[in-house]
Image (spheres, helix red, strand yellow):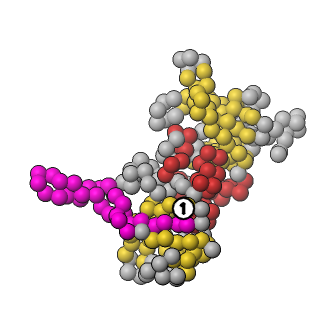
Amino acid sequence: MSTTGSNEVSLHETWGLVDYLDSTVVQKEIARFRQSEATMMAILMILEGDTLVRTFGSVLYNQSYTLEPSKDTIAMIQSKISRDTWALIKQGDLIKMAQVKVEFGQIDSNIYTLRRRHDLDTMTNGDQLQFERCLTQYFHRHIFEGSYTNAVNGDTVRFSAPNKISGLSNYDSYWVNGYFGTSHPFKEKDAVLLINSITKESSWYNWSFNNNRLVLIPFAKETIKVNGEWKETDEYVLSNENILLVHH
């Protein structure tokens, strides 16, 4: 824990949203945790002195505010999505992010936590696209990397840094959908793109973990009947096939 000369706890740090960065890794899910407004606003925050210098969210970024670090509530920030007001509150060596019902002067029951994440400083060194690439690699490293056995044919399948895959059909790389932005055609299901970089062919799969088992289910384009004819939409649905991989 860093302090200032007056023994006041220093807030100068990269702060990470526990309810997203930690929960996605522990639960091995992304889609479920991306829906909160806190995630859309501030997966990471950079605090320097009396300023919230920059935010990185799944939708919004580059917000900045003046802080009052000597107070418990160090800032009141406004979401550009809902226009709701959020309070940033010091609590020990954590920061709580709580929605404020201004008209009632009350704090909402949905309270999120940010902790110091010096280990993620490199994510904040570039623009929003660089942040998204770094965060996707974070998911690769902490959720997928490792060796698996294909339950059908016994082949060894490896997910390795930075986004390589071997032993699964002709795929040699992969890229997890991090649910950035607002266009999401996978109906709130986790998705990973498996790629053959030689042929440039690729396929989207739904992924889910159950203990040491990783299940991959191919996505197929949704079709609907329009004026008696079947037409593809921009949405995806699950097919009836699956691949079961068991983590070593």
Residue plotted at (30% across, 61% down) = 221
Residue plotted at (55% across, 81% down) = 156
Residue plotted at (58% across, 27% down) = 108
Most common SS among magenta residues = strand
Residue 119 occupies quadrant: bottom right
Q: Position of residue 162 (x, y in %)?
A: 58, 71
Q: Which of 25 and 175 is in front in this view?
A: 25
Q: What is the count of numbered marks?
A: 1
Amino acid type, callout 1? Phe
Chain part drawn in magenta: 213-241
Q: Which of 142 and 161 is in front in this view?
A: 142
User: Quadrant location of the N terminus?
Assistant: top right
Query: To which residue does mark 1 refer?
Result: 209
Q: Residues within 10 Å of mark 1 (few under 14, many from 20)?
A: some
User: Quadrant location of the C terminus?
Assistant: bottom right
**Is residue 73 visible in the rendered structure shown here?**
yes
Q: Is residue 142 above or below residue 199?
A: above
Question: Was residue 234 drawn as part of the magenta stretch in this picture?
Answer: yes
